[in-house]
Amino acid sequence: MIQPDFALTPEEQKLLAEIKFKVSEFSGYKDAQRNGKTVNALVKSLLKRKAIPAIRVKWFTDPELNPGGRGKSRKDIFDCNGSSGDEMLEHPSFLEFLFRFLCGPDLPKVAITTFRAAVVGYGKVTSGDIDGLRKTARSLTRQYQLNAHSAADDFYLLALECGVWHSYAESIRETVRSVR
């Protein structure tokens, strides 16, 4: 089961336990609809009490934090595809964003800890520190044999969560994307 990195209310825990995060687990259309309604209820509860870390919400809603989004946020892309509001929250494609709202970057725990320690080691990250952080992210991607494309976006989110300026985080993302 998914383990959020912040506290849920008992009702939210119950909702989370009912959610299937893999579309392949759905047993049909009605199951997908039920799952979507449960996701909707959970997200609304989390947003109402402002439980989701602010940077994760901003990562989803701010066009500036969506490299390669051509001026659109991740939320805007749902809107452009005809899914907004409840439809967006209930769409199976929203599950990957729900995971990141709850747990943050989808990386091995040891990779997250190692990268966070590297950022802390630099103190306030400046342009002179980025090369070291890019090397750390690249090395972790190789060490844990991560898919470079998806790991790039997760290291980007991780860098943002660590307080790294978005342009520097984008540089880290591009470095990880180039891993072969």
Image (spheres, grey):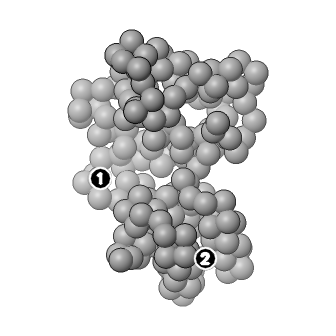
Nearer the observer, 72 or 30: 30
Residue 69: which numbered mark, if any? 1
Query: Which residue is at 48% across, 20% downward?
Result: 35
Query: Which residue is at 47% across, 65% downward?
Result: 146
Residue 125: which numbered mark, if any? 2
- Count neighbours of disc 2 (C-alpha within 10 A) and say few if under 14, some if 14 to 19, many if 20 or more: some
- The amino acid type found where label 2 is placed reads Val
- The amino acid type found where label 1 is placed reads Gly
Query: Which residue is at 34% across, 16% downward?
Result: 29
- The x, y position of residue 152, in whole percent, is 43, 64
- In the image: residue 115, left or right of residue 170: right
Of the image marks 1 and 2, the number of the one nearer the N terminus: 1
Q: CA distance from mark 1 to mark 2?
A: 25 Å
- In the image: residue 142, left or right of residue 178: right
Tell me which corner region of the image, top left, top right, bottom left or bottom right, holds residue 116: bottom right
Query: Which residue is at 48% across, 49% downward?
Result: 59
Tell me which corner region of the image, top left, top right, bottom left or bottom right, holds residue 123: bottom right
